[in-house]
């Protein structure tokens, strides 16, 4: 049951002189001694979040925040109106497979449906693709699934006669196989399955994953349609409880690809779909990391893997059945400086390579010669022209097609689906989200590069109003993250444009620990290399000032979750660089959190941070970068932290302890640079909190009254 954070009785009104008096929890020092290091922890008692005294303290924090931001109500109202319209992120263009157009529809008039129509000139639009009209079917279009809201996966039989859908249910998915023409259920006996299923070549059997008691896809089974599922044989079992299996069908339809992945390793098998009773064939060893990719290319296998010597990714090939990869693979193409290969998809006439170049997603097409080999000397990159356009390969299932589809996004590019042909010509638009009132010419977006102390170049994505001059006077909102290999790629968001309209420069620091420059970029910012992320963020702030894009006393740092550890550590390192910090559900007391006996580290967290209870290096790294444990007695930026009692994996005590320690040690005038905490019951419907935080940040940066 959720405990609501409400005062037990109405609070008496406060006198005007009391409005700046923030709550001051009583220090109750305890000492932590580990690996010979002694640390004083005066506010550890705030971790007892369910006790009445801690709840009373959080109620007082909310009341103080209410008073401190009361004058911002008009700005909050204006921002709420500006941010009410979200840019739809979903794009859905019909896909062609064996003469059928398959159509995903998501629209208030249509619901969420899955349908198909035979390819003919009458159904094709101007770009040669059907253009579904909300509220009406195309000529000859038939509905296959009328309500997809609980459908997690769909498989089409090779003869297009059957359709299997994986419906969400207790204990796993229920697999329902229907006749595509009549809708009659052929088989619905399999329960407890994963969402991925593949038909055998003769359409008589369904290969699927099976969940274990942990909800992990732990087995691959074969189910003959119409048979008793209790007799289904297990084709493959994954005993490692950190690993999970996933299935896919090769694009030429000949093979089942089975992939086992965990945060630390990957392994791949294949199975001939014409012989589904056979044993899957292992094609790779259990390889370290998650970046290894194997793609079935019809007459050969393609492999993406890291070169042990250079740590750069390599595209390689091997004949079918040639032995265990990567030992038997022949290198074809090496990633260059600033590049990282992410995935590869094979077609009869070419290969599509998803990669990252200069910290942005990109796609290249590599032609295949008549003998099926790859012509790596004739690579074509899909170019769209925007300086921060991220190009991502979209699903295109037809083996014989000679074009691909890509999604394009940036700060100023609405979600757009484009097509690109192997035969050349400019990319053409298949679908674009319409954003009423957007005038991209009002803004500029740029890529900057900062230099970290170890000479590493760190990318920055930036957007500003076109008339903002880089003369050292602009307020800047700087996003930082740098954990778990996650990427902060530019997207068109009303919030960002609203800030730019007010003359605020919005920048994203792509620091190490993120994934923007590939797996090695992530590796160089995790565990004992954690401080690289902090170095990078400080370098990015310095560069924005040095290049004139930022006023030195008007940088606001923004972070969420574990990314707040990086931002908080950067503020401890160089508090003079930042005017304000906005932190959502911040992991700013990470060492105490990870040492707490009730916290069970996931494998991903263990890889990211190490185990500070057992590993002295992990302990000392977290000790050095923990924002709450390294606050200095000096002037600090203003802080607004918001968190929740429920709905987040990060304990709300992190923010409460950080705020308490800031108030205890910093020397800033609390009237000019307040330290505020907002604690909600949950983050459901958290838009009000986000708007409140942005309004506060604009006020701190002196941009509350600026208008576009």
Image (cartoon, rainbow, N blue to C red):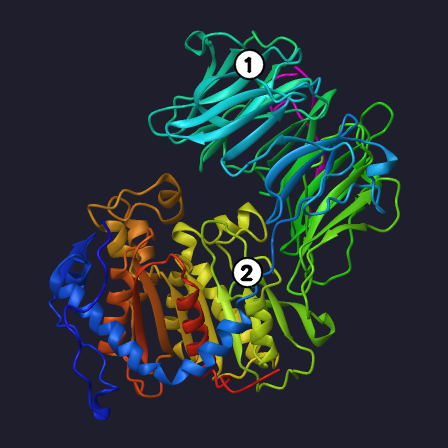
Contact, mark 2 vs mark 1 (Cβ under 8 Å): no
Question: Dividing the picture into quarters, in which one does residue 677 lie?
Answer: bottom left
Frontmost residue, 33 versus 30:
30
**Residue 326 included in the magenta stretch of the image:** yes
Count of marks overlaid on the render? 2
Please tell me whether mark 1 sits on a helix, a strand or a loop: loop
How far apart, in angstroms, are the residues tagged by discs 2 and 1?
41 Å
Q: Is residue 218 visible?
A: yes
Point 78% across, 45% down: residue = 419
Q: Is residue 382 above or below residue 27?
A: above
Residue 231 on image: x %, y %? 43, 7
Residue 506 on image: x %, y %? 57, 72
Label 2: few (<14), some (14–19) or many (≥20) C-alpha neighbours in 10 Å: many
Point 21% across, 56% down: residue = 3
Task: Pick whichever of labels 2 and 1 is earlier in the sequence.
Answer: 1
- The span shown in magenta is 318-337
Frontmost residue, 100 versus 427:
100
Residue 361 on image: x %, y %? 65, 51
Q: Residue furthest bottom?
A: 17
Query: Which residue is labeled 2 in the image?
Result: 510
Q: Quadrant of the C terminus?
A: bottom right
Label 1: few (<14), some (14–19) or many (≥20) C-alpha neighbours in 10 Å: some
Query: Which residue is labeled 1 in the image?
Result: 280
Q: Is residue 129 above or below residue 11?
A: above
Question: Dividing the picture into quarters, in which one does residue 332 lie?
Answer: top right
């Amino acid at each position: 049951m959720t405990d609501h954070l409400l005062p037990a009785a109405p609070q008496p009104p406060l006198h005007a002189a009391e409005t700046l008096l923030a709550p001051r929890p009583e220090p109750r020092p305890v000492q932590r001694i580990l690996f010979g290091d002694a640390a004083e922890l005066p506010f550890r008692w705030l971790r007892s979040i369910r006790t009445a005294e801690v709840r009373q303290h959080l109620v007082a924090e909310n009341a103080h925040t209410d008073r401190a931001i009361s004058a911002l109500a008009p700005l909050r109202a204006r921002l709420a109106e500006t941010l009410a319209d979200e840019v739809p992120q979903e794009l859905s263009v019909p896909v062609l497979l064996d003469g059928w157009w398959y159509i995903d529809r998501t629209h208030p008039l249509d619901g969420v449906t899955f349908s198909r129509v035979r390819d003919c000139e009458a159904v094709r639009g101007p770009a040669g693709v059907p253009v579904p009209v909300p509220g009406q079917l195309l000529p000859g279009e038939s509905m296959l699934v009328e309500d997809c809201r609980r459908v997690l996966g769909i498989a089409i039989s090779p003869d297009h006669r059957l359709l299997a859908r994986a419906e969400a249910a207790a204990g796993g998915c229920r697999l329902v196989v229907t006749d595509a023409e009549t809708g009659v259920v052929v088989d619905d006996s399999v329960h407890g399955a994963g969402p991925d299923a593949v038909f055998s070549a003769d359409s008589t059997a369904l290969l699927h994953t099976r969940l274990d008691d942990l909800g992990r896809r732990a087995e691959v089974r074969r189910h003959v349609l119409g048979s008793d599922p209790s007799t289904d044989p297990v084709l493959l079992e994954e005993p490692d409880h950190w690993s999970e299996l996933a299935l896919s069908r090769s694009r030429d339809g000949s093979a089942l690809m089975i992939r086992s992945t965990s945060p630390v390793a990957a392994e791949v098998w294949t199975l001939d779909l014409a012989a589904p009773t056979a044993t899957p064939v292992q094609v790779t060893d259990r390889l370290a990391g998650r970046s290894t990719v194997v793609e079935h290319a019809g007459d050969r296998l393609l492999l993406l893997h890291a070169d042990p010597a250079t740590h750069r990714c390599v595209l390689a090939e091997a004949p079918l059945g040639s032995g265990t990869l990567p030992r038997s693979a022949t290198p074809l193409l090496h990633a260059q400086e600033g590049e990282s290969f992410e995935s590869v998809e094979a077609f009869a006439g070419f290969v599509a390579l998803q990669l990252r170049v200069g910290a942005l997603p990109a796609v290249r097409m590599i032609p295949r010669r008549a003998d099926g080999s790859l012509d790596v000397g004739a690579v074509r990159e899909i170019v769209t022209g925007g300086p921060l356009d991220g190009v991502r390969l979209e699903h295109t299932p037809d083996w014989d097609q000679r074009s691909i589809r890509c999604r394009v996004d940036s700060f100023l590019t609405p979600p757009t689906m484009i097509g690109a042909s192997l035969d050349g010509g400019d990319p053409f638009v298949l679908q674009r989200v319409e954003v009423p009132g957007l005038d991209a010419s009002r803004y500029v977006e740029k890529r900057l590069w900062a230099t970290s102390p170890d000479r590493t170049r760190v990318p920055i994505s930036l957007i500003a109003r076109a008339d903002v001059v880089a003369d050292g006077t602009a307020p800047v909102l700087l996003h930082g993250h740098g954990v778990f290999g996650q990427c902060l790629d530019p997207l068109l968001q009303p919030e960002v444009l609203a800030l730019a309209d007010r003359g605020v420069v919005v920048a994203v620091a792509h620091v190490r620990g993120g994934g923007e420059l590939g797996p090695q970029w992530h590796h160089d910012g995790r565990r004992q290399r954690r401080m690289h992320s902090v170095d990078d963020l400080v370098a990015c702030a310095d560069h924005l000032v040095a290049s004139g894009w930022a006023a030195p006393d008007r940088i606001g740092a923004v972070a969420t979750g574990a990314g707040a550890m990086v931002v908080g550590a950067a503020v401890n390192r160089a508090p003079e660089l930042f005017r304000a910090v906005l932190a959502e559900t911040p992991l700013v007391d990470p060492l105490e959190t990870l040492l707490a006996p009730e916290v069970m580290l996931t494998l991903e967290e263990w890889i990211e941070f190490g185990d500070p209870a057992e590993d002295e290096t992990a302990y000392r790294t977290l000790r050095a970068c923990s924002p709450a444990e390294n606050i200095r007695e000096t002037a600090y930026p203003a802080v607004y932290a918001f968190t929740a009692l429920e709905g987040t994996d990060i304990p709300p005590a992190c923010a409460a302890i950080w705020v308490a320690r800031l108030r205890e040690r910093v020397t800033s005038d609390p009237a000019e640079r307040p330290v505020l905490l907002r604690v909600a019951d949950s983050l459901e419907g958290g838009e009000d909190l986000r708007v409140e935080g942005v309004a506060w940040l604009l006020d701190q940066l002196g941009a509350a009254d600026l208008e576009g």
